[in-house]
Image: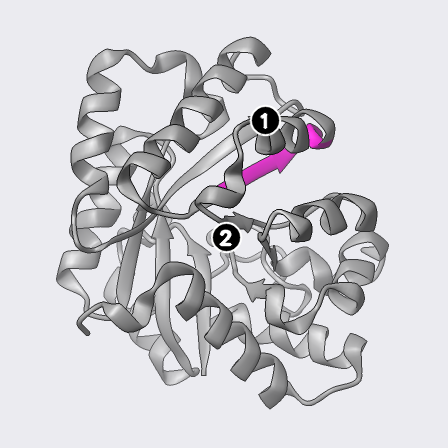
Amino acid sequence: MFIDSHAHLDDRQYKADQQEVIERASKNGVTQIVCVGYDLPSSKRVVALAKRYANIFAAVGIHPHDAQDTDESTWAQLYELGRDTRVVAIGEMGLDYYRNLSPRDVQQAVFRRQINLAKELGLPIIIHDRDAHGDVLRIMKEEKVNEVGGVLHCFSGSWEMAQECLKLGFYISLAGPVTFANARGPQEIAQKVPLDRLLVETDCPYLTPDTWRGQRNEPAYVKRVAEKIAALRRISLEEVAEATTANARCLFRLLDKKQ
């Protein structure tokens, strides 16, 4: 069994066959999926999706790309969404210095505010970090993220950064890039992160694993990520599946949720 800990099934790329994609995931051993919002409209969509499917849960948040579009009404609505019983995390949030679609100071302020919102709601957080490792880690420490816990999704930092995140009680999640031939960084992380701190994800429809590279990604393909991790660690696929499933259930408290 597998849990896709980060998916975007509300994306328009699934408009024609969303139900078939969800059914295909189940047939491939993906028992649960966490669908993640990146702004208010997507957050509302993933909550609605989680209400329709028993094996789907939602995370609600503001991606750094959309940080500059927030106002006070954003926070009131996000708080109400976060109170829904189908919501298991706040995010995705964080910093993206690769595209810089929002000013960096605004990204940082919105990141901090979401961490504090998660504290209010008693929910873990999902962090997006692209080319912003130093500031992400600094804010994590300053805002005492260990009080809520969470995951660095599609981790792209160094082993040294991963160790600092582990000290804060965070999980590390790997996606399709770990399967790429030249992905030395993610593959080092896959080998070194303790198995009880590792999650798997697709980040679909993006980051498709090597087997289907160039095509749309989907939750069924999370098995390929787990297979690569198993090969790198020289352990069985079953061990990776069991550990990452248990980790996701623990982080998102899925065992407390009604199926």
Q: What is the quadrant of residue 249 in the picture?
A: bottom left
Mark 2 or mark 1: name the one nearer the start of the chain: 1
Is residue 70 visible to us here?
yes
Q: What is the quadrant of residue 228 in the picture?
A: bottom right
The answer to whether 61 is drawn above or below residue 247 in the figure is above
* Image side of residue 248 versus residue 18, left or right: right
Q: Residue at x 29, y 35 (%)?
A: 120
Task: Please provide percent x and percent y for residue 139.
Answer: 59, 26
The local secondary structure at tag 1 comes to helix
Q: Amino acid at mark 2?
A: Asp
* Nearer-the-camera pick, 57 or 147: 147
Q: Residue at x 29, y 75 (%)?
A: 23
Q: Which residue is mark 2?
A: 203
Task: Please provide percent x and percent y for residue 152.
Answer: 58, 47
Crowd band around label 2 with a 10 angstrom C-alpha radius: few (<14), some (14–19), many (20+) = many
* Nearer-the-camera pick, 163 or 215: 163
* Nearer-the-camera pick, 232 or 83: 83
Q: Main secondary structure of the magenta part?
A: strand
* Image side of residue 18 versus residue 207, left or right: left
Whole-number angstrom distance, CA of label 2 to CA of label 1 = 28 Å
Is residue 219 visible to us here?
no
The answer to whether 228 is drawn above or below residue 76 in the figure is below
- The answer to if 243 sits in the magenta stretch is no
Q: Which residue is mark 1?
A: 142
The disc at residue 210 is none
Circles 2 and 1: CB atoms closer than 8 Å: no
Task: Give the quadrant of the C terminus.
Answer: bottom left
Q: Amino acid at mark 1?
A: Glu
Q: Please state the extent of the stretch shown in magenta in the rendering.
A: 126-133
Q: Residue at x 71, y 30 (%)?
A: 131
